[in-house]
């Protein structure tokens, strides 16, 4: 097979080069590891670029607990309307992100996912860096920062539908919850990396807190372009959905274009032939709407912590002291560390129980007392604060991770689609796009409510978690009924077999 022919079929240039240097190709398992690693890195970069705004909030908006000389702030965020304007910046980003998600999902099922993801990462890096350039250019116009966040949000919308679709293309349903729970740690790893990077260069000027993560995601985009095989067909394997839920041949399966059915693309043309379904058709898949609405409130809670936790830590007395901006940014990573374990635990339990809705609802209900305990007792000491913060992160991010990964991938190849895996990105976009509307609303409301007191903010968060659990009630009942029916069937089978065994004896 000639090199130009492979390139036209969408084989990444980096893989072509490595094949030529090695003189042979990898097996299926190696490609799967590579896909997991590259998509993990890619979305970690996306989340790393979302953290700087949370880290620099206390620099842009004056801290009343410090001397005026230490808290000059940055116009236009240093006035009485500072918190609300910071909330508007957040909602501008997330609103464009959520709206762009619906378009990005459809495009992701139509275009080459590798090129689509590369473009999104490059664009995100450029506009995140431009936001930081406002510091170096001495820009004090609110519209500048607002517009940079809006465009960055549109580019960021390309990320999630793309990476979930790629994983769905390479992995079947068996152990998908556990695999994606571990893989979804990229969200927390990205948040932690972004927090540490932004905080580490903050002393040199808040603009650097945006420049460094922006450069990181641009580099990640280059890696994606060179090495990400978005579809098994791109590197010579049969699609997983064409041969079984978890089975693919371990060796290359070449498909001759001349033998392809008329009017259809050969399997090898994975990136060059896409057929997707419409948004309305995707919404009719059972479970899409309930999980999308649940994610609306789950992300409202999660993103409020993402954008406002460092700011909250600087304005809350912990053990009789107030934290510096840098210390608050570093300590806030414990929420994301708990989220890593939450995603893995939720994925494992949902696989073990074969009950996605029950697992997600249970986590959301358990998050309610956890958040209340954090608000009431987090100020006692730093140790208690960190422990409760990590527990809250585990319970809040667990269902969020489960719904946006395993649930989205399950529904994207639902039986009602008759095996058409090209709905993966579209379904993921509907679910996460709806969730992102909640992600935009939470930080916006927090910007206004926090001026009246943090107790009201936590009340909003607990109500959001409760509604998220309630929205899954119908699916929870269905799963319980299904399991009761299965158990009854097993009991009937066993009781029917017992007399037969006795007769044989």
Image: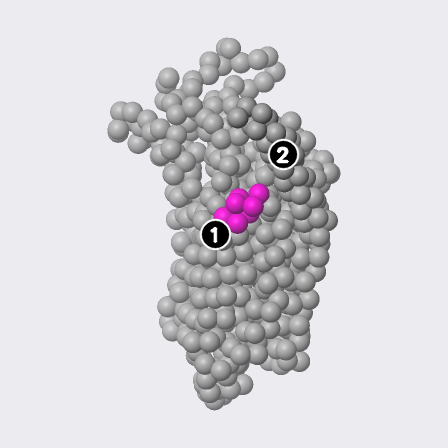
- Is residue 270 shown left or right of residue 475? left
Instruction: Assess whether mark 2 and mark 1 are in contact (beta carbons under 8 angstroms).
Output: no
- Residue 325 seen in the current view: no
Give the residue drawn at x 73%, y 38%: 284
Height in image: 224 above or below 4? Answer: below
Quarter-wise, where is residue 265 in the image?
Answer: top right
| SS category of the residue bearing label 1 | helix
Height in image: 316 above or below 260? Answer: below
Q: Main secondary structure of the magenta part?
A: helix
Give the residue drawn at x 53%, y 52%: 346
| Foreground of the two, 123 or 107 | 107
| Foreground of the two, 89 or 424 | 424
Give the residue drawn at x 50%, y 69%: 389
- Residue 38 seen in the current view: yes
Indicate the quadrant containing the N terminus: top left, top right, bottom left or bottom right: top left
Please report whichever mark, 1 or 2, sits nearer to the chain's N-terminal start: 1
Circle 2 sits on which residue? 495
The residues colored magenta run 347-354
Q: Position of residue 245 (x, y in %)?
A: 53, 30
- Is residue 28 shown left or right of residue 108? left
Q: Position of residue 30 (x, y in %)?
A: 36, 34
Height in image: 41 above or below 274? Answer: below
Q: Position of residue 482 (x, y in %)?
A: 67, 41
Circle 1 sits on which residue? 344
């Amino acid at each position: 097979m000639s090199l130009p022919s492979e390139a036209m079929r969408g084989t990444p240039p980096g893989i072509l080069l490595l094949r030529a240097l090695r003189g042979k190709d990898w097996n299926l398992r190696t490609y799967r590891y590579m896909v997991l690693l590259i998509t993990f890195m890619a979305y970690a970069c996306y989340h790393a670029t979302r953290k700087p705004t949370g880290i620099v909030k206390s620099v842009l908006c004056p801290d009343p607990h410090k001397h005026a000389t230490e808290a000059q702030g940055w116009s236009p965020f240093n006035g009485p309307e500072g918190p609300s304007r910071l909330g508007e910046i957040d909602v501008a980003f997330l609103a464009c992100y959520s709206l762009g998600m619906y378009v990005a999902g459809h495009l992701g099922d139509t275009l080459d996912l590798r090129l689509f993801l590369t473009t999104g990462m490059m664009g995100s890096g450029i506009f995140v860096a431009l936001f930081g350039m406002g510091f170096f250019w001495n820009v004090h116009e609110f519209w500048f920062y607002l517009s940079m966040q809006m465009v960055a949000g549109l580019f960021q919308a390309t990320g999630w539908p793309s990476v979930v679709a790629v994983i769905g293309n390479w992995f079947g349903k068996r152990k998908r919850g556990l695999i994606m729970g571990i893989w979804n740690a990229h969200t927390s790893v990205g948040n932690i990396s972004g927090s540490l990077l932004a905080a580490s260069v903050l002393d040199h000027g808040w603009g650097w807190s945006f420049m460094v993560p922006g450069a990181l995601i641009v580099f990640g985009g280059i890696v994606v372009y060179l090495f990400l095989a978005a579809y098994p067909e791109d590197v010579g394997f049969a699609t997983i959905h064409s041969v079984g839920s978890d089975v693919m041949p371990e060796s290359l399966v070449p498909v001759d274009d001349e033998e392809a059915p008329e009017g259809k693309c050969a399997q090898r043309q994975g990136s060059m032939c896409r057929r997707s379904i419409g948004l309305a058709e995707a919404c009719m898949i059972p479970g899409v709407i309930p999980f999308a609405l649940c994610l609306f409130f789950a992300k409202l809670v999660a993103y409020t912590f993402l954008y406002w936790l460092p700011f909250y830590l600087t304005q809350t007395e912990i053990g009789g002291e107030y934290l510096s901006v840098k210390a608050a940014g570093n300590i806030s990573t414990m929420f994301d560390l708990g989220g890593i374990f939450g995603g893995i635990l939720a994925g494992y339990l949902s696989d073990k129980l074969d009950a996605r809705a029950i697992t997600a609802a249970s986590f959301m209900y358990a998050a309610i007392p956890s958040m209340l305990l954090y608000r009431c007792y987090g100020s006692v000491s730093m140790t208690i604060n960190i422990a409760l913060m990590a527990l809250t992160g585990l319970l809040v991010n667990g269902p969020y991770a489960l719904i946006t990964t395993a649930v989205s991938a399950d529904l994207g190849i639902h039986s009602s689609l008759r095996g058409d895996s090209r709905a993966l990105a579209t379904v993921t976009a509907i679910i996460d796009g709806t969730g992102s509307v909640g992600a935009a609303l939470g930080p916006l409301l927090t910007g206004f409510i926090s001026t009246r007191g943090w107790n009201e903010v936590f009340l909003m968060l607990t109500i959001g978690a409760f509604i998220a659990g309630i929205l899954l009630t119908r699916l929870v009942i269905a799963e319980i009924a299904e399991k009761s029916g299965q158990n009854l069937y097993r009991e009937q089978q066993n009781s029917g077999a017992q007399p037969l065994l006795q007769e044989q004896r």
